[in-house]
């Protein structure tokens, strides 16, 4: 699949085949894609928590109102920001950097044939607090990405809108 095809084909997947796992090699490829994303001054202000425990999955489903599909996903990846790794020129850019990592995860997962869905956490304070406590972390939970074998294949959508483009 070309990059163009992968980008055009990717959709948020919220239905997964229960019990279908992701082999470690594929998970590593996805995480490497995340860490290959660009970041301000190459500060790479992120860390990734892979959710495998059924217990923690249940807790997440309880605290996140729009992530029920984690139930059947093979895993969830919680992308966490590390503002402590940014100084000077890169200071404050960590949400953009984490978003770039998130998009790379979605595209790489799609390229490998998995479905995925970005579930926002940051900047919603109650969600940030609940994830921080649940995962017992000092980094800032930014987004949960669910990944698994899709049991739905929504059609590709075209969002191209020329009214949003201008030239100067
Ligand atoms: C910042 C952000 C937060 C999102 N949060 C959720 C969420 O909590 N739950 C969910 O099911 N989808 C979530 N989505 C997915 C969007 O709903 C989805 O990308 C959008 O409807 C476009 O559909 P598509 O991804 O299939 O093109 C989120 C996407 C982004 C970028």
Image (spheres, grey):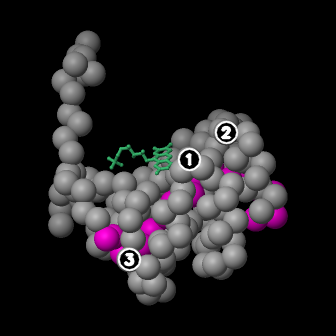
Spatial CA span between label 1 and label 3: 22 Å
Q: Which residues are magenta?
A: 135-151
Q: CA distance from mark 3 to mark 2?
A: 30 Å
**Cβ–Cβ below 8 Å for labels 2 and 1?**
yes
For residue 114, say whether it is visible.
Answer: no
Q: Residue at x 39, y 71 (%)?
A: 16
Placement of 19 over or under 1, stated as above or below? below
Q: Is mark 1 within 8 Å of ligand 1?
A: yes
Q: CA distance from mark 2 to mark 1?
A: 8 Å
Observer-nearest residue: 116 or 96?
116
Residue positioned most to the top: 168
Residue 145, given in percent of the width and then of the height, sits at: 51, 60
Of labels 3 and 2, earlier in sequence is 3
Q: Which residue appears at 53% of the width and 60% of the height?
A: 68
Against 73, residue 104 (above or below) is: above
Q: Which residue is mark 2?
A: 124
Secondary structure, mark 1, is: strand
Mark 1 Cα-neighbour bin, 10 Å: few <14, some 14–19, many ≥20: some
Neighbourhood count class around disc 2 (C-alpha, 10 Å): few under 14, some 14–19, many 20 upward: few
Which residue in the protein does label 3 denote? 17
Q: Does 14 sit above or below residue 94?
A: below
Q: Which residue is mark 1?
A: 120
Query: Does the magenta run of residues contain 142?
Result: yes
Residue 95: give x, y in percent of width and height.
60, 42
Quadrant where the C terminus is found in the figure? top left
Q: If you read the primary sequence from the N terminus, does the residue marked by circle 1 or circle 3 appear first?
A: 3
In-image side of 62 versus 26 (left or right): right
Q: Are marks 1 and 3 in contact (CB under 8 Å)?
A: no
* For discs 3 and 2, the disc positioned in front in the rendered view: 3
Left or right of 118? Residue 131 is right
Q: Is residue 129 visible?
A: yes
């Amino acid at each position: 699949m070309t990059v163009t095809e992968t980008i055009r084909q990717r959709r948020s997947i919220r239905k997964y085949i229960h019990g279908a796992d992701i082999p470690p090699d594929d998970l590593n490829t996805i995480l490497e894609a995340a860490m290959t994303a660009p970041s301000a001054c190459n500060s790479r202000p992120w860390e990734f928590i892979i959710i495998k425990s059924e217990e923690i999955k249940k807790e997440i489903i309880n605290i996140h109102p729009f992530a029920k599909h984690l139930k059947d996903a093979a895993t969830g990846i919680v992308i966490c920001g590390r503002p402590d790794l940014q100084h000077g020129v890169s200071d404050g850019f960590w949400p953009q950097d984490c978003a770039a990592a998130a998009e790379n995860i979605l595209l790489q997962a799609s390229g490998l044939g998995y479905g995925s869905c970005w579930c926002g956490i940051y900047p919603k304070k109650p969600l940030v607090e609940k994830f921080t406590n649940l995962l017992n972390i000092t980094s800032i939970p930014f987004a949960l990405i669910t990944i698994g074998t899709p049991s739905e294949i929504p059609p590709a959508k075209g969002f191209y809108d020329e009214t949003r483009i201008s030239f100067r």
